[in-house]
Amino acid sequence: MAGADISDGCIRVKNGKIAEIGRRNEVKFHPDSQERVIEIKNGIIMPGIIEAHCHMGITEEKKGMEGDDCNETVDPVTPYLRAIDAVNTMDAAFDDAVRAGITSAMIGPGSSNVAGGQFAFLKTRGRRVDDLIVKAPAAMKVAFGENPKVNYSGQGQSPSTRMAIAAMLRQELTKALAYDNKKKKALEKGEEFEEDFTLECWLPVLHREIPLKAHVHRVDDIFTAIRIAKEFHLKMTLDHCSEGHMIAKELAKEGFPAIVGPDLASRSKIEVQNMAFKTVGVLNKAGVMTAITTDHPVSLIQSLPLCAGLAVKSGLALEEGYKAITISPAVICGVADRVGSLEVGKDADIAIFDGNPMEVFTRTLYTIIDGQVVYDAQDQDGASSDI
């Protein structure tokens, strides 16, 4: 994922980072030290797989209402909510992710609200969420289309139309801009300024430090999201983008990346009637940077590499399939300086398979996060050990 495949390759890890990488005869080991050596006879060593959009640990498996903290469905505008305050790292999905070679994930609120709250980019192994954070906040969730409409029209309040969704988001962004300008002027003059918790959360978005994470399926919703992002000069990712293949050339011109999926799920509502595994390949060929998502638990997190395989089967180039679950989501999520490829200085997040992980019979041999072996197929008790 950094531009080269290395046969008979070797990686040396030190202090949780990749210290050396190259051919076996180029990397010098120190057998008298305490270094652990893992030798793979035949297999693929690659960057840890990345899930670019999911609700793991917020919508817990088997827990019903008690474990569902995904949507605050009493107020359509809740940008100040933080994913890290709801992620339960004991959710079984984290263990499933690790066993599938998935080492990090973008996790956040769902799509019932016009503005749902802040996503966080987390590693997938650990007890305390604070220790898993790579970037938080990492994105601001906004949603267009059926989900906000269905949730709030049933409560007899706005939004009950797509017009209202767009208008409410514009109103909130306009308030946030006014707040930002007022704060800047006060600080320039050395005046006291009372921060507003409900608006402070928008500043990283307005300053283009993090993107809007836009839930969009239909063509019209995709273009509405783009229209608003351009009006306010914001960064944005197009999440789901189910009808993106119908407007691929236009999206390539606009330059916003797409996180496509969950195509393994059923077409459970009208706005996803045209979703298909071909979408990511059509967008990628048109020049759109693409990642693939399971949207866990809509599709199970461990199916992510298989979803990439189905996209390849439907036209996505094989190398682009690998990129769609490694370096591309790392770039899209703003964390490519740490994860997504095997390069010196990056986090030692490494997945080792006995074959192509996009093929159904392939087994995960090892999963390594921050230089720790967190999954060893030969050691099913889950014990971690440094390398």
Image (cartoon, grey):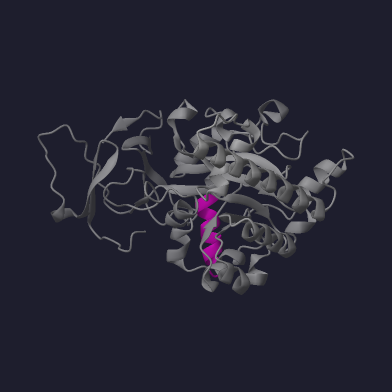
- Tell me if 33 is positioned left or right of 222 in this view: left
- Total marks shown come to 0
Q: Where the N terminus falls, by quadrant?
A: bottom left
| The magenta stretch spans residue 313 | yes
Rendered location of residue 142, percent (x, y): 67, 47
Query: In the depicted view, which residue is nearer to us: 239 or 97?
Result: 239
Rendered location of residue 317, percent (x, y): 47, 69
Query: In the depicted view, which residue is nearer to us: 379 or 255?
Result: 255
Q: Is the stretch drawn in magenta largely helix, strand or loop?
A: helix
Rendered location of residue 59, percent (x, y): 64, 35
Furthest-right residue in this view: 156
Q: Which residue appears at 70% of the width and 58% of the height?
A: 217
Query: In the depicted view, which residue is nearer to us: 292 or 174?
Result: 174
Q: Which residue appears at 60% of the width and 67% of the height?
A: 278
Q: Which residue appears at 78% of the width and 33% of the height?
A: 74
Q: Evaluate whether residue 190 shows in this view.
A: yes
Furthest-front residue in this view: 189
Query: Is 386 drawn above or below residue 157 in the view shown?
Result: above
Residue 71 position by quadrant: top right
Q: Which residues are magenta?
A: 304-315
Query: Is 378 drawn above or below residue 221 in the view shown?
Result: above
Q: Which residue appears at 49% of the width and 34% of the height?
A: 95
Query: In the depicted view, which residue is nearer to us: 357 or 106?
Result: 106
| The magenta stretch spans residue 157 | no
Q: Where the C terminus falls, by quadrant?
A: top left
Rendered location of residue 170, percent (x, y): 72, 51
- Tell me if 325 is positioned left or right of 348 in this view: right
Q: Evaluate whether residue 300 shows in this view.
A: no
Residue 56 position by quadrant: top right
- Tell me if 340 is positioned left or right of 140 in this view: left
